Amino acid sequence: MKLKRIAIILMTVLSVFQLSAQNKLNVSASKIDKMQWCSDARFGMFIHYGVYAQWGGMYHGHKMNKGGAEWIMNRSKIPVQEYKDSALHFNPTKYDAEAWVKMAKDAGMKYIVMTSKHHDGFAMFESKASDWNIVKATAYKKDFLTPLAIACRKYNMKLGFYYSQAQDWTNPGGAVGRKVAVEGWNNPDSAQIDKYTAEHRGHWEPIQTSRTQAQYFDDVAIPQIKELLANYGDIAILWWDTPVDMTDDMANKVQEILKKYPNVITNDRLKRPNFPGDFKTPEQRIPNWDELDNNNWEACMTMNGSWGYKSYDDKWKSTETLVRNLIDIASKNGNFLLNIGPKADGTFPQESIDRLKQIGEWMRLNGESIYGTNGSPFSELSWGRCTQKPMKGNTIIYFSIFNRPTDGKITISNLNNKVLSCELLETKSKLDNHLNNGTLEIILPEKLPNQIASVVKVVVSGEIKKLEGENNKKMKSGALD
């Protein structure tokens, strides 16, 4: 009988272990499934827009201190009432949600992340939790997000909302970057925040501290998160930012809400540590391979130097830089979230429109090398980048050439798969190639079809194994500009 009891106990323990393992597999599979559309998309539009757009980075004729224009209230220490009074004039009558979405789609973007509430606490939607919103506090008097959600559905564009869950400079109780908060945030991917937040710690008006942060979170943040999830159809992403003074208790309240929305993906900025979300968010840079640890990630970057509209910021990245950044990011299994800062009237700056159009022209010809691809199986390629995707038991390799080698050929080592076809993606022109002892040489024409990046499409037999170890550490880091 004793042996029988021992056997029963062992079987019970084994069953529990198997159930636990299966649950972990199910959770892992579920995460992969809900992230699949995002990994396939690779390219999205970030939009930073709110009351701060009408300031344009200027306060009483003076340029704001360093930082993005969306930080002007904090940087210039604008009194709460003065900032709220300015909203009475905020009236983006030229806002055309369908035009916004169509520009994103034509640029080859597959999703949009819109700032629903930034750190100034101003909600771009009708909210019962706070009158500090676009319907009740402005001349516009309409919910800004509703037409955007309708346009996204029309053009099959995934929609996500950025929401500042902790920092709020206007609603009493919101965090404003106190010292302990800065240490708790310590975002390693935003040198700008790290460098300048130290100069702007602390509340600057008594009204900001008239409630506790716990009260603010329960009375404003939690109800508004529920409103965003319930009122705009299927939301794809909740994009948190700066978890200043966030506690595990606060974060768990958000997680409880999200249980009702299992397909919503979230980033890693809800609360650090313990709440990693579904993807990492390096800011204004492209990380090394060895930093990524096979995690989903998305690099968010500006077109110029500011997230929000800054009237005097003319440091625009070239279209070449933006496209090559996209290629570089895709070559490392990442997504590119490229920011637009609309003007006060609701229109995009012309420089942004021009770049979106030019990016779209490249994507229409070469987007196949971006969408649904996996990262490069090769170590650093001095002349460009590489992506790949499976095709009926074989593999398509895309070599994006930034700089044509002087000898007129590209050389790829550590490839032992038989070459089935080799051509320029843009022109469908066949290219001569030679595979000898694991080294592939592809002969290029004297003039490549695209100055930004010409893509060579190679189909090889079977699967290519990912290189490991030191080879991956050779991959370049940082944006290409």
Image: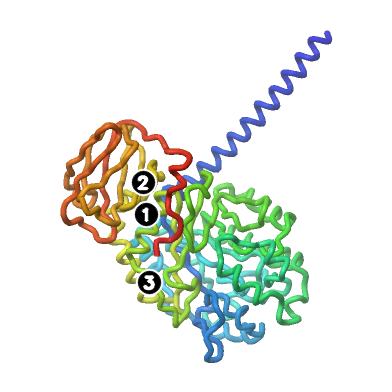
Q: Nearest the camera: 97 or 361?
A: 361
The residue located at (48%, 73%) in the rendering is 306
Disc 2 and disc 1 in contact, CB within 8 angstroms: yes
Q: What residue is disc 2 on?
A: 387
Q: Name which residue lies at 83% across and 8% down.
A: 1
**Which structural element holds mark 3?**
helix
Marks 1 and 3, the one that precedes in the sequence: 1
Whether residue 131 is visible to the viewer of this picture, yes or no, is no
Q: Position of residue 352 (x, y in %)?
A: 38, 71
Helix, strand or loop for disc 2: strand
Q: Nearer the viewer, residue 156 or 321?
A: 321
**Which numbered disc flags the more N-terminal residue, 2 or 3?**
3
Residue matched to label 3: 352
Name the residue: 77% across, 72% down. Answer: 211
x and y, in percent, of residue 111 in the image: 44, 57
- Tell me which label, 2 or 1, sits earlier in the chain: 1
Q: Residues within 10 Å of mark 3 (few under 14, many from 20)?
A: some
Mark 1 vs mark 3: give the one in front.
1
Up/down of 454 relative to 55, above or below = above
Which of the two residues, 191 or 63, is positioned nearer the viewer here?
Answer: 191
Question: Looking at numbered disc 3 in the image, what kind of residue is underneath it?
Answer: Ser
Report the quarter where the C terminus lies: bottom left
Taking the image as shown, residue 284 lies to the left or right of residue 222, namely: left
Where disc 1 sits, the SS reads: helix
